[in-house]
Amino acid sequence: MCEGLVGIPLEDMSGSPAPYNGLVMSILNADLHCHSTISDGTLTPETLAARAKANGVELWSLTDHDEVAGQHRAMAAARDLGMPYLTGTEISVTFANVTVHIVGLGFDPDHPAMVQGLAATRGGRGERAREMSDQLAKAGIPGAYEGALKYVGNPELISRTHFARYLVEAGACKDTNEVFRKYLTEGKPGFVPHRWASLGNAVGWIREAGGVAVIAHPARYDHSPTQEYALFSEFKAHGGQAVEVVTGSHSPSEYVKYADMAIEFGLAASRGSDFHSPEESHCDLGSLPFLEGRLTPVWELLADRIR
Ligand code: AMP
Ligand code: MN
Ligand code: MN
Ligand code: MN
């Protein structure tokens, strides 16, 4: 379960369907961050759509890492369920030597700038995976590349998550959290530093394709307060417009901290579970607290992009 008071779907409060055209409302069960088999989730776009709908999600986005190949499927599934949809992706960026994730929402998924930019971002993953596997072999875990591949749904998108699943299968750790603690993270075997997209490029692709850029889960980065301030300032200078305030990996005090920062920097606020898998994610689709009323919900900026 996600931390804090769980949002009550609007139907339960009013007895009538959510006034979906009342997009000015912060009280909307929007879930604008999750992953499918197109990246490192374990459910297909269609199964995720059904789960979101069953959980009362009123506005949904599938945000696979560095990839838009699931967008038309997610959109069609949402349409069949009568669930409003925003296109999405989560772009891997290197900022101040740290990997930062930038979510894009409401863009044209076929726009060449976005499609080519994401393809270039995915490009280094195969070689990185081979190097991760070599390091793990030296640490006594052979065959991790082949093992991880068994969990990969999209050959262009091999990620640390797929290695983590294999390491659990191989008995190296009891769960994927333990894998990230002992392996695959800075200073541990299986961590291969990688240069992702630049912040300016990622925000630029999203904007060129007509979308809104969002700083994903800001509390998760290994930045000093000065670097965090620089991230927000430069993101804003590049045309970034929103920050995830309520997300699966934030604590209640982090909801407040990033709500304050959204207001300080004049950014809209987003809400998304970052759901990957029923077995691994502690926060299910649509089960987060609502955004505080003092925030501008990112969907206010995207009212005309909702399908
Ligand atoms: P990659 O893009 O290959 O570097 O993989 C990053 C992904 O690994 C993230 O999107 C998460 O799904 C997963 N991940 C990163 N850190 C952790 C962690 N501490 N526990 C569980 N999953 C993690
Ligand atoms: Mn992931
Ligand atoms: Mn992320
Ligand atoms: Mn994510």
Image (tube, helix red, strand yellow):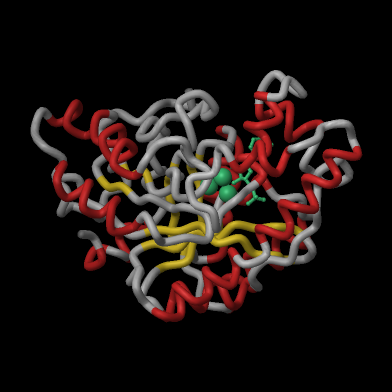
Residue 122 visible in rendering: yes
Q: Residue at x 49, y 66 (%)?
A: 266
Q: Quadrant of residue 227?
A: bottom right
Q: Nearer the viewer, residue 20 or 86?
A: 86
Q: Residue at x 68, y 29 (%)?
A: 177
Furthest toward the left, the residue is 16
Image location of residue 190, percent across then percent down: 81, 43
Residue 27 visible in rendering: no
Q: Nearer the viewer, residue 14 or 177?
A: 177
Image location of residue 11, percent across then percent down: 16, 31
Image location of residue 162, percent across then percent down: 61, 40
Image location of residue 167, percent across then percent down: 71, 30
Q: Residue at x 49, y 76 (%)?
A: 116
Q: Residue at x 29, y 50 (%)?
A: 74
Decide if residue 262 is on the left or right side of residue 138.
Answer: left
Q: Nearer the viewer, residue 72 or 197?
A: 72
Decide if residue 97 is on the left or right side of residue 198.
Answer: right
Decide if residue 140 is on the left or right side of residue 181.
Answer: right
Decide if residue 182 is on the left or right side of residue 2.
Answer: right
From this view, report whether residue 153 is shown above or below residue 156: above
From this view, report whether residue 248 is shown above or below residue 67: above
Rendered-image quadrant of the C terminus: bottom left
From this view, report whether residue 166 is shown above or below residue 196: above
